[in-house]
């Protein structure tokens, strides 16, 4: 039976094994003189052990099917918009990127009115840029036409 | 004693001069705003505003930056309580019960207790800083790498043991956090670990993107699209004051949090974060009703908030007396002092008494300013809850991206925040606690360095951890906690943590 502990435990085991595999590129050192790989190897082994124990003992945890996933589409949409922001930030500049992100989130995802969306997005994008970049002199990225 | 009071008089003469007072006030206001903004914590705030102090003299600059620091610690509780988004990492524990209180209509009471607790702790710990700094700093000086290693390991074990429910899951999360903390250049050998060619990862994963991702972004992912959006809590004015029972229940946690926070603050590490974790664990352990924790226990707000503010003052002890920063924020403060031509250390008090005692006095003034600012503005902050969540969360997202980007000017940090957000969302669904990950990321480089330095000191002999009394004691207590956590497996009975987890599950289903 798939339970939350078993799924989590399996993911931890896989992650631990991946780290162990990747650690082979680094010198392990010795027991008395540990090298740069030693701590990651110890921690990855612990992760495999803890994950394995969760797999073995996790039968009584909550069933995965019982976990509510109703909001997953919304979560994916928000994540995708934020990933776009990370990609665009240094290409389009702060103001354009944040303006676009807010228009997408408010207008398309949350279905707010067009005028509210445009005014709110422009105000927040330009306002935060003014406060941080102009007033506080925190350099924020500029895009085409220095926008 | 008389000499200290006389020096303090000199300090107040400096701190109450209009110019310095104005900058202390400005620092507190800006710091509170920085703390309130999710994702822009004290570290980012001080870093962002350091260039703004370049035109000031050293005393005003240091007083203003210190104001930002403890103002942010004060303000960090606001978003934790109102939105379950920590304004800075030390407010992570306040999220748990503060937000639960807000959902029960006690947001105002939680904010007021956080403000009063922060004031009491802040003021008391400045007194302690003034009188106890020399002997306490001397005690901390006895700590070598073996003691640090034992202390840091002990901290993780305490955290895992005190976590409600499964110690196994908490330890797994701590191990995951420690592994994430391994990313970057190995400080002993210079090897790049798990950086995959990304130069930005050379210094490791920053605590800001991890904390904002796991607690801020993950929360938005989990709540923004729920069929029933999070209820907008609209407390009435009379609910803004704590009840008599809440005042009574907060007194002892504030006292304990103050002492714990100050003592932990002196020890190198991210003291304000650790102190709030330890305070929360202690309060839950000492509580007659531990099942209330996680569901709106006022002690879960009062203790950690007092502890993280007391730790702020405690962290200044090694910085001012020894010139040794005890964490990333004091390190930035140290850099700021050096920019202004001030060299913190044993000679600072003798050579620049106006600056040292002016700084101490400004902390008293700052705490009063913060209390005056925060209590009347509680109502203003509560108004944030009246903004519909579909409008609020895109704004918070903008500040998350902005705050994370501004720390290093790096898009890689924004990506780390997004990945941590996705991880936090999944872990939340699978019922894993994410707080040990944050602590693991902070402690990983320190633990590894302390271990390898200890072995270098002892020619590779692990017995060094057993032959040094402080290290042996800490490891011994940690071992006992591990054994205690195994007891239910042997006796087939439920210990208090298992009973707590069961109670939590029952409440979730009810």
Image (cartoon, rainbow, N blue to C red):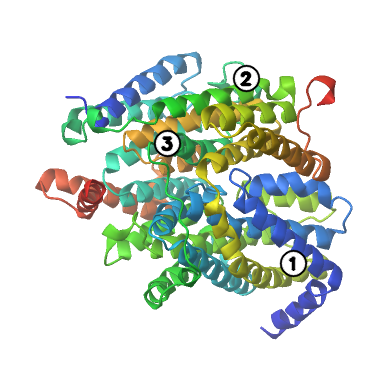
Task: Give the residue number, with chain letter if any, for mark 2.
Answer: B198
* Residue wearing tag 1: B359
Q: CA distance from mark 2 to mark 3?
A: 30 Å
> Mark 1 or mark 2, which has the lower sequence index?
2
Identify the residue at the far left of this view: B492
A114 and B280: which is toward the camera: A114
Q: Which of the two marks, 2 or 3, is nearer to us in this view?
A: 3
The chain holding disc 1 is: B
Q: Which residue is mark 3?
A: B222
- In-front residue for pair A100/B488: A100
Q: Quadrant of residue A144?
A: top right
Q: Position of residue B488 (x, y in %)?
A: 16, 47
Callout 3 crowding tier (Cα within 10 Å): few <14, some 14–19, many ≥20: many
Q: Residue at x 60, y 72 (%)?
A: B123
Q: Front-most of B310 and A25?
A: B310
Q: Indicate left or right for B70 with B61 as reference.
A: left
Kindly indicate whether the residues beneath marks 2 and 3 are on one polypeptide chain. yes
Could you tell me which residue is drawn at 58 percent across and 45 percent down? B38
């Amino acid at each position: 039976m798939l339970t939350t502990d078993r799924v989590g435990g399996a993911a931890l085991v896989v992650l631990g094994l991946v780290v162990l595999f990747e650690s082979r590129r680094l010198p392990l050192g010795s027991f008395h003189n540990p090298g740069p790989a030693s701590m990651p190897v110890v921690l990855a082994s612990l992760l495999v052990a803890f994950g394995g124990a969760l797999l073995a003992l996790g039968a009584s945890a909550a069933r995965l099917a019982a976990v509510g996933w109703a909001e997953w589409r919304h979560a994916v949409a928000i994540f995708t918009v934020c990933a776009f922001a990370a990609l665009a930030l240094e290409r389009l500049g702060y103001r354009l990127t944040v303006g676009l992100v807010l228009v997408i989130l408010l207008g398309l995802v949350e279905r707010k009115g067009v005028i509210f969306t445009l005014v709110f997005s422009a105000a927040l994008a330009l306002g935060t840029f003014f406060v941080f970049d102009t007033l506080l002199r925190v350099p924020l990225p500029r895009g085409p036409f220095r926008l | 004693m008389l000499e200290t009071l006389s020096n303090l008089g000199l300090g107040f003469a400096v701190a109450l001069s209009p110019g310095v007072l104005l900058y202390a006030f400005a620092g507190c206001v800006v710091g509170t705003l920085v703390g309130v903004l999710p994702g822009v914590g004290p570290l980012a705030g001080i870093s962002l505003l350091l260039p703004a102090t370049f035109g000031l003299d050293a005393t005003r600059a240091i007083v203003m930056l210190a104001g930002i620091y403890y103002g942010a610690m004060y303000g960090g509780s606001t978003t934790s309580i109102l939105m379950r988004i920590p304004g800075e990492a030390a407010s992570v524990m306040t999220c748990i019960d503060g937000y639960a209180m807000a959902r029960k209509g006690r947001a105002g009471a939680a904010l007021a207790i956080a403000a009063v607790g922060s004031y009491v702790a802040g003021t008391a710990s400045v007194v302690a800083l003034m009188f106890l700094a020399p002997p306490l700093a001397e005690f901390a000086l006895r700590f070598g790498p073996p003691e640090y290693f034992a202390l840091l390991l002990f901290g993780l074990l305490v955290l895992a043991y005190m976590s409600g429910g499964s110690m196994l899951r908490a330890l797994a999360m701590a191990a995951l956090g420690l592994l994430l903390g391994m990313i970057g250049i190995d400080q002993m050998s210079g090897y790049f670990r798990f950086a995959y060619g990304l130069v930005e990862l050379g210094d490791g994963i920053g605590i800001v993107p991890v904390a904002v991702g796991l607690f801020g972004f993950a929360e938005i992912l989990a709540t923004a699209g729920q069929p029933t959006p999070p209820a907008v809590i609209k407390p009435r004015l009379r609910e803004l004051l704590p009840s008599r029972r809440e005042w009574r229940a907060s007194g002892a946690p504030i006292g304990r949090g103050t002492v714990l926070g100050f003592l932990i603050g002196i020890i190198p590490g991210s003291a304000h974060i650790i102190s709030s974790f330890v305070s929360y664990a202690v309060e839950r352990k000492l509580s007659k009703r531990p099942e209330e924790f996680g569901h709106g226990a006022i002690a879960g707000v009062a203790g950690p908030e007092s502890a993280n503010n007391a730790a702020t003052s405690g962290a200044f002890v090694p910085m001012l007396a020894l010139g040794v920063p005890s964490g990333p924020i004091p390190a930035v403060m140290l850099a700021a002092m050096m920019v202004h031509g001030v060299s913190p250390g044993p000679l600072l008090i003798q050579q620049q008494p106006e600056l040292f005692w002016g700084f101490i006095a400004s902390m008293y003034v700052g705490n009063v300013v913060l209390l005056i600012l925060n209590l009347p503005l509680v109502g203003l902050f509560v108004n944030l809850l009246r903004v519909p969540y579909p409008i609020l969360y895109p704004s918070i997202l903008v500040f998350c991206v902005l705050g994370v980007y501004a720390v290093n000017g790096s898009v890689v940090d924004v990506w780390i925040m997004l990945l941590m957000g996705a991880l936090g969302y999944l872990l939340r669904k699978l019922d894993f606690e994410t707080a040990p990950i944050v602590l693991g990321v902070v402690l990983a480089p320190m633990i590894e360095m302390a271990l390898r330095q200890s072995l270098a000191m002892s020619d590779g002999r692990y017995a060094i951890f057993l032959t040094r009394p402080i290290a042996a004691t800490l490891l011994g207590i940690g071992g006992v906690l591990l054994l205690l956590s195994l007891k239910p497996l042997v006796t087939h009975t439920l210990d208090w943590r298992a009973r707590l987890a069961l109670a939590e599950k029952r409440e979730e289903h009810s």
